[in-house]
Amino acid sequence: MDTIASLFSFITTPVSWVIVQFHSVYGKVFGPDTGWAWGLSIVSLVILIRICLIPLFVKQIKATRAMQTLQPEMKKIQERYKNDKQRQSEEMMKLYKESGTNPLSSCLPILAQSPFFFALYHVLNGIATGSTIGVINDSLLASARKAHIFGAPLAAKFTDGSSKVEALGATLTDVRVVTAIMIVMMSASQFYTQRQLMTKNVDTTVKTPFMQQQKMLMYVFPVMFAIFGINFPVGVLVYWLTTNVWTMGQQMYVIRNNPTPGSKAQAAYLERLTKHVTHHEKTRSRGERAIVKAIVAKGRDRNEFERKFINSLTKAGLVAQADGNVAKGEATAVETEDGTPTTATPRRQQPKRQTKAQRQSAAAKAADDSAENAADDADEPKTSLSKSDEPEDAKPATAAKKPTPKPAGGTRSKAQSGQRKGPQRPKSPSKK
């Protein structure tokens, strides 16, 4: 073990040095031999490592988004070359090269974090075996062996025997209870992190084998953490528990503020963004402008939630611009589900239904009004102003024109059978 530790001294020495520096700070507050000083030193080491890995985390998010975008094309390749695995692999690599994506990019934070985990494991194992490692000398080694977290030594494991645990100044029950609780919390945090990724931040419009694999990993990873956790020292469990909690919080922040297009998280984000933009009539931050700019640039390729966002702005009298800002404009058109703009016409409101009594009273009032108008017209004297505009000399001297006499019987004259309608030609005289 010493040989292996010496081979990896390039990483164990910096890790032990960072722990010692944090221990010197927390030791002044909680005491140098307490579990709080050493435990918080490990937590601070995790936070420092994860802060340094933020650029890789951002790259991991971009790689994951790119892989999700390529899922439909990958599915087509798998169906087209399902009987030719070699050609399928060649087409996959060609697709990755053309799109500039790398499947291993999503594993970068885990791969980058592995050396630190390995180094911390050997540092804590050296504390358990009583051997110095890195910059931890004999005095720091004795102080670390006295440190307990809720009664469990930092170097104790779930599988340790009673004699080894008693040598570290603890009881087997305390070690088993503390390590079991930490293993359960570590597995539960890992499960919740993967579950919120699958239920909130996955494009629900695309069903691919990749989603099934992620769903399977959601149950496999917690089981693996539980199995391997019984062989980890308490200090390593503190490391992994802190890492999982950090990952969970970091992922919750990303899902809330930069969700995957087409996911439930995007629907919730755009609903919040609609309220903020319509209330302030502008985008307030660079992130909001970036989201609006990306939605505008998609055009007719927008998904259901993005079209709903654009339509909500249009109905509020706002227009999303290409630079991500929002300006006032007329609500002239909205987009349908297929992205086609249509004119937004206001709905015609139906008249309120009246009761029978109201209809009868309205009819009686209308009848009274018409009777009063007729009486007023009869009583009104005729003046020269009421005469017709037609000149008097143009009128015939006689009275009104006589109506055209109707045929007898008051019915239309019908053509006799076999006789054509209209004027008839006179018959020629018959020759005798």
Image (tube, rainbow, N blue to C red):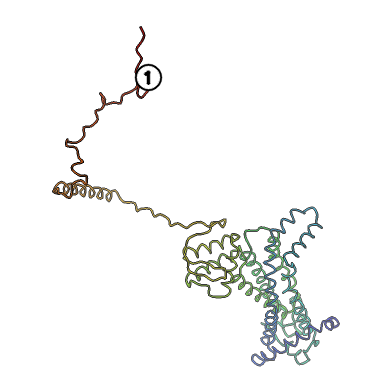
Q: Position of residue 320 (x, y in %)?
A: 53, 67
* Vertical relation: 120 (above or below) 24: above
Picture residue at 78% right of the left edge, 91% below the top: 137
* Vertical relation: 354 (above or below) 197: above
* Vertical relation: 45 (above or below) 333: below
Q: Position of residue 401 (x, y in %)?
A: 21, 34
Residue 177 visible to an observer of this rendering: no
- 409 displayed left or right of 194: left
Picture residue at 74% right of the left edge, 56% below the top: 77
User: Residue flagged by tag 1: what amino acid is it?
Assistant: Gln
Task: Tell me the quarter of the image containing the C terminus.
Answer: top left
Q: How many marks?
A: 1
Nearer to the camera, 199 or 414? 414
* Vertical relation: 159 (above or below) 23: above
In this view, which residue lies farthest toward the right? 3
Nearer to the camera, 337 or 139? 337
Q: Position of residue 347 (x, y in %)?
A: 43, 55
Q: Position of residue 35 (x, y in %)?
A: 68, 86
Pointer 1 residue: 419
- 354 displayed left or right of 137: left
SS of the residue under disc 1: loop
Please tell me in which quadrant of the rendered image residue 208 appears: bottom right
Please tell me in which quadrant of the rendered image residue 428 appears: top left
Residue 45 visible to an observer of this rendering: yes
Picture residue at 64% right of the left edge, 91% below the top: 29
Nearer to the camera, 382 or 306? 382
